[in-house]
Image: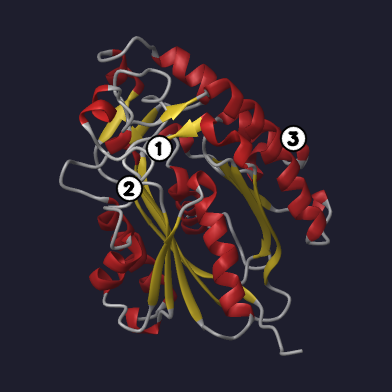
């Protein structure tokens, strides 16, 4: 059997738009309140891209920042994976647009769609290329412009989502570090719970799809919440178990930033103190595939993550999908 290399994250980068929409701003356009939103979600504000900014623009800045911190050039990147549900267009892929923007002339490039689990799906895919030795440096980006697909009159969804991008570079790391466990899962029977129905081959754009507002995000909130509480907690615990760790050996949890009550369920399952869980959804809301990489980058830049720390990342999303991994921080 061929030798397998140890893959891990060697650098991070992120970017969020400058424009901020607070809960008080939303009170002026939809029937809601700051208290209602904070109590049920933990969200206080979110970042929104302007009309001329697309997902590839956010992803490009995050990618450039990750390259700078890795002390690599774009030519050193062998593959670019962009996880997104809000691509610039159906094709070409957002990853190809990022490749052009940063000048990664040696990289293959493709998009991956697993909703809010997309970044971790991309991480697991990237690690296979590193582990087998086929590639040395794979860039994984989670990037979204969800604000462009939100019905700002729907108080059930417009309060939840924001825009942003996070990038990491997955490379070979020394033995004993890097990824310790990886979990991917899906349940297509829950496909109807979180959808953006129109614009594809099933319901191409038409007068009818626009009139019925099918180009907006629709969500069965209570059902998604019940699924998320169960799966986030159980998969976080499973990732620790598969890594051969105990709960006491977990140094940090970086969860998908969708709802503070869902995050709390995962934290309690791992029996972690609050200061061992990174939370930024109060400032950004749910950024789907960008959520975890932005949180990871912030935690790294704040010095909360140190070499040798055991970190768990876990997320869930439309599909329904879920993903988790445990890793020993290598840099």
Name the residue at 58% across, 29% down.
Answer: 224
Of labels 2 and 1, earlier in sequence is: 2
Of labels 3 and 2, earlier in sequence is: 2
Indicate the quadrant containing the C terminus: top left, top right, bottom left or bottom right: bottom right
Image quarter for residue 157? Answer: top left
Q: Position of residue 322 (x, y in %)?
A: 62, 46
Task: Report, in whole angstroms, how far the alpha carbon at label 3 lies from the one at label 2.
Answer: 29 Å
Q: Secondary structure at mark 1?
A: helix
The chosen color scheme is: secondary structure
Left or right of 287 on screen, residue 145: left
Name the residue at 55% across, 43% down.
Answer: 256
Residue indicated by mark 3: 268
Q: Position of residue 62 (x, y in %)?
A: 35, 60
Residue indicated by mark 2: 16
Left or right of 190 on screen, residue 231: right
CB-based contact (under 8 Å), mark 3 and mark 2: no
Task: Report, in whole angstroms, how far the alpha carbon at label 1 lies from the one at label 3.
Answer: 23 Å
Residue indicated by mark 1: 284
CB-based contact (under 8 Å), mark 2 and mark 1: yes
Name the residue at 48% across, 46% down.
Answer: 115
CB-based contact (under 8 Å), mark 1 and mark 3: no
């Amino acid at each position: 059997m061929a030798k397998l290399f140890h893959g891990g994250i060697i650098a991070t980068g992120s970017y969020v738009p400058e424009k901020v929409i607070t809960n008080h701003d939303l009170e002026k356009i939809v029937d809601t309140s700051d208290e209602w939103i904070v109590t049920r979600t933990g969200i206080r504000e979110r970042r929104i891209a302007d009309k001329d900014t697309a997902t590839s623009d956010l992803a490009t800045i995050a990618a450039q920042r990750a390259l700078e911190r890795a002390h690599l050039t774009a030519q050193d990147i062998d593959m670019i994976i962009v996880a997104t549900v809000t691509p610039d267009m159906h094709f070409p892929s957002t990853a190809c647009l990022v490749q052009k923007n940063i000048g990664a002339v040696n990289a293959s490039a493709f998009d991956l769609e697993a909703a809010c689990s997309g970044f971790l799906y991309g991480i697991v895919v990237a690690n296979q290329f590193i582990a087998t030795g086929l590639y040395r440096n794979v860039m994984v980006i989670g990037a979204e412009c969800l604000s462009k697909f939100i019905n700002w009159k729907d108080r059930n969804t417009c309060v939840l989502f924001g825009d942003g991008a996070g990038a990491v570079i997955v490379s070979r790391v020394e033995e004993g570090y890097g990824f310790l466990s990886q979990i991917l899962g899906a349940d297509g029977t829950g496909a109807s719970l979180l959808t953006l129905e129109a614009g594809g081959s099933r319901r191409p754009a038409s007068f009818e799809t626009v009139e019925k507002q099918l180009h907006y995000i629709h969500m069965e909130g209570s059902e998604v919440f019940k699924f998320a509480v169960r799966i986030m907690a159980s998969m976080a615990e499973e990732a620790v178990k598969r890594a051969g760790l105990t709960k006491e050996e977990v140094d940090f949890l970086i969860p998908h930033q969708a709802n503070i009550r869902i995050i709390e369920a995962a934290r309690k399952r791992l029996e972690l103190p609050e200061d061992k869980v990174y939370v930024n959804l109060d400032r950004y809301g749910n950024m789907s595939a960008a959520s975890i990489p932005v949180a990871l980058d912030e935690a790294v830049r704040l010095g909360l993550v140190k070499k040798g720390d055991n970190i768990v990342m876990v997320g869930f999303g439309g599909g329904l999908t879920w993903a988790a991994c445990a890793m020993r921080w290598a840099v």
